[in-house]
Structures are given as C-alpha cells and as structure tokens.
Image (spheres, helix red, strand yellow):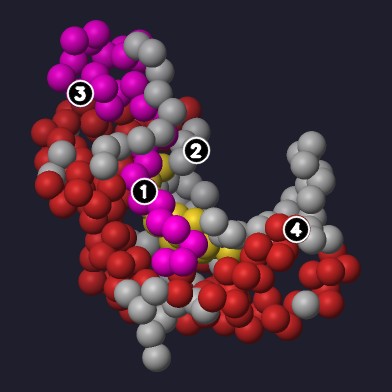
Amino acid sequence: MALGFSPKAVSFLRALKRNNDREWFKARREQYDTLLRAPMLAIVERLAVDLREFAPTLIASPKVSLYRPYRDTRFSDNKAPLKTNCAAVFPPRDLGRHQGAGLYFEIAPTWVWIGGGMYAPDTSQLQAVREHIASNHNRLRGIVESPVFRRTLGSLEGETLQRVPRGFAKDHPAGPWLKHRQFLAARELPATFAYSPTFYRELVRTFRVIAPLVTFLNEPLTTR
C-alpha cells in the first residue's frame, strides 16, 4: 500500500482547526491515531531505511521525529491547546533534535510543506556556518543554483540581514548567503497532495534535493 494519508486525515485537521479544544480532541483521539499518527509512523519507519542512502547522518525514529499534538502554551499568547498540523523532523544524529540542519515535513488543513535546512542556529553555530560558506562558497553555489534545486525548491530562503555581517568583506562573493540568519529550502503543495498516490515518492525526491544543503550546513558543526 502506498505510504501517505487519506482525504479523511485532511478533513480531521480542518475539523480540529474549527474545534481546537482538549475535550473535542479527547473524544476523537482514536480517529487522530488512525488517520494521522499511524500513517506518520509508517512514513518515519520507511524513511529510517531510505535516508541511509542519501542522508545517513540524519535520524528518523518515532521517538525523535514525531511531534506531539499538544502545544506548549506556557509562553505564548495563543492558548489554543492543539497543533492543527501533523509533522515530523529528521535532525542530525550528532547534534540534537533542534540543532544544526535537518529535514522536515508537515500536513496541515490547507497545505503540505516539505523542506529542510537550518531554522534557528545559535550565535556560535551561525558564525561557524558563515565561515564555512565564506571558504566554500563555490560548493554552496553548486548546490543552490543547480537546475534540480531551482526547479524543485526555487532559491535559498530564510531571514537575512541587510548587510554582510561584521568580519567579512562587504564585497565577498558569498555576500548574499553570508547575510542569512536562516538557511531554508522548501516546497509548499496543496493539502490534497497528502493523499496523492505519489506522496511518498515526491517526499523522498524532495528530501534528496535538499540533502546536499543539509550536509553542507552541518559540516562545520559536526567536525568541531
């Protein structure tokens, strides 16, 4: 059977968005587990095998990859108790769940998002990555300006500075990339893609395109 989700899974997320309430969810937890958690577990378990071929340094496991449905509302103005998406992350084995660069996908009421890169590096990590880019910018150019990257993902995205950061020449050939505070690559598809028969194949194909960027970004962090 093809790995992916059903139309009922997307319908459940849309209903959850309208009824973001613990009691509503508790009464329908079995539906959530059947429609969303079980297919997600199957995908993660398959990726644990398939990632070995093109991203062997990343982890795919239910314990690490899956996100809980409940939101942490302690420090947020948004007190809605539940996430209205279903997501999984595949982080670097040597760095930790939200450290370095990794792969990620989610299905939501109105989209499927498949992407990867580095979302929130700390100051020391960001400096190490920038130094790596400055010394290896031709390699990075070869990754993010390749036809398959542009065709699948567009361009490198993420928050940027207005100027090249201190410590690097203003006219450095890697200037546009040195300005980045995040290094992200992704494609967004309609929610109906979650139940396309090509879902898993396209998920893996997209991850294959992003994997060289993830490897490049992690190199200065895993060799320190």
Residue 18 disc label? 4
Q: Residue at x 49, y 62 (%)?
A: 191
Mark 4 element type: helix
Find out whether residue 188 is within the magenta segment: yes
Q: Earlier in the sequence, mark 2 or mark 3?
A: 2
| Kind of residue sitting beneath label 4 | Arg
Residue that label 1 marks: 186
Q: Residue at x 79, y 37 (%)?
A: 77
Q: If the image is split into quadrants, where does the N terminus sit?
A: bottom left
Numbered circles on residues, count: 4
> Badge 2: how crowded within 10 Å, few (<14), some, or many (20+)?
some
| Quadrant of res 110 | bottom right
Q: If the image is split into quadrants, where does the C terminus sit?
A: top left
Residue 192 on image: x %, y %: 46, 66
Residue 100 on image: x %, y %: 42, 46
Residue that label 2 marks: 120
Q: Residue at x 32, y 74 (%)?
A: 198
Residue 138 disc label? none
Q: Earlier in the sequence, mark 4 or mark 2?
A: 4
Residue 174 disc label? 3
Do tag 4 and tag 2 residues touch (Cβ < 8 Å)? no
| Kind of residue sitting beneath label 3 | Ala
